[in-house]
Amino acid sequence: MMRFAIFLTSLRKTWVWRGEQGIVTATALLTSAVLALLGATAVLVTTTDLKVGGQHKSSDLALYAAEAGTEEARARLRGTAGAYLITDVSPTAAQWRAYIGEVTKAQAQGYNPGQSLHLRRDSLQTTVSYLVMIRHKTNGAGQVLYWGDDNGDGINTANTTAGNNIYVVASWGYAGTATRRIEVEMTRVLPIPVPSPLYVEAATTVQGSSTTIIGTDGCGSANKPGISTTLPAGQVNFNGDRRSRVQAARRASYTMLRIWTSRPWWTA
């Protein structure tokens, strides 16, 4: 009976000893695999973050380059640009284009050296990479649009007959493999419309025989009447020996009275 018990004890001890040895090996292998997986994941995440960060930086640099392109276009469309002026020789042509940048980049955006309405200029700098295309803004019918007062109401709007050209400026910025594009509209600022040297909104009497109100345009031919008012006829009078005549002209929702004198020193 004792021999049987000793035999079982011996078998049980032998079996337990062998089982512990296998678990340790398997645990070591499993731990190594988990650590390797975690390491690979960490490397992948880090690499992805670096790539995303690099692409984001390149995208931002490309956007800044595109903005720089619009600024060069604006500077070269000004009348004070001198030798660097982008001259619009065909202000009524919808097909007119002006490019700023390298030839290859310009050709990729439609530049045709054989097209008389296309012109290209090198950028004034070489640090930032961009291409700019300038064109006339058009309406749905393909008509060139201008910014100005086309109906004499003193309000500037986009129209097809009067004012300065509206330019659509598209700029592509490049940085590494990134490309960004922005588009803006530009036009030259028009002078403030002046209906006349003197504007009145209340009943007015011009006193004296030596009062002079001159509406002559000394810099051009846009002569103006001496006095403008929204009042009905008879509300602007003259206290003196002079004759006058009144001409009414419809302006928007009110009547504009233009008043001249027949005396030569009162010029309308």
Image: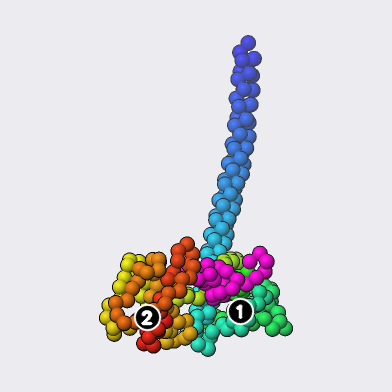
Type of amino acid at the residue the image marks with label 2: Arg
Residue 199 falls left or right of residue 173: left
Between disc 1 and disc 2, whose residue precedes? 1
Asked whether residue 128 appears in the rendered view, the answer is no
Q: Which residues are magenta?
A: 139-165
Q: Is residue 235 above or below residue 44?
A: below
The structure's colour scheme is rainbow
Residue 243, labelled with which disc? 2
- As for residue 190 lying within the magenta part, the answer is no
- As for residue 146 lying within the magenta part, the answer is yes
Quarter holding the C terminus is: bottom left
- Choose between 241 and 186: the one closer to the eye: 241
Within the image, what quadrant is residue 257 found in?
A: bottom left
Q: Which residue is mark 1?
A: 91
How many residues crowd around disc 2 within 10 Å: few (fewer than 14), some, or many (20 or more)? few
Type of amino acid at the residue the image marks with label 1: Pro
How many residues crowd around disc 1 within 10 Å: few (fewer than 14), some, or many (20 or more)? some
Asked whether residue 29 appears in the rendered view, the answer is yes
Residue at the outermost top position: 1
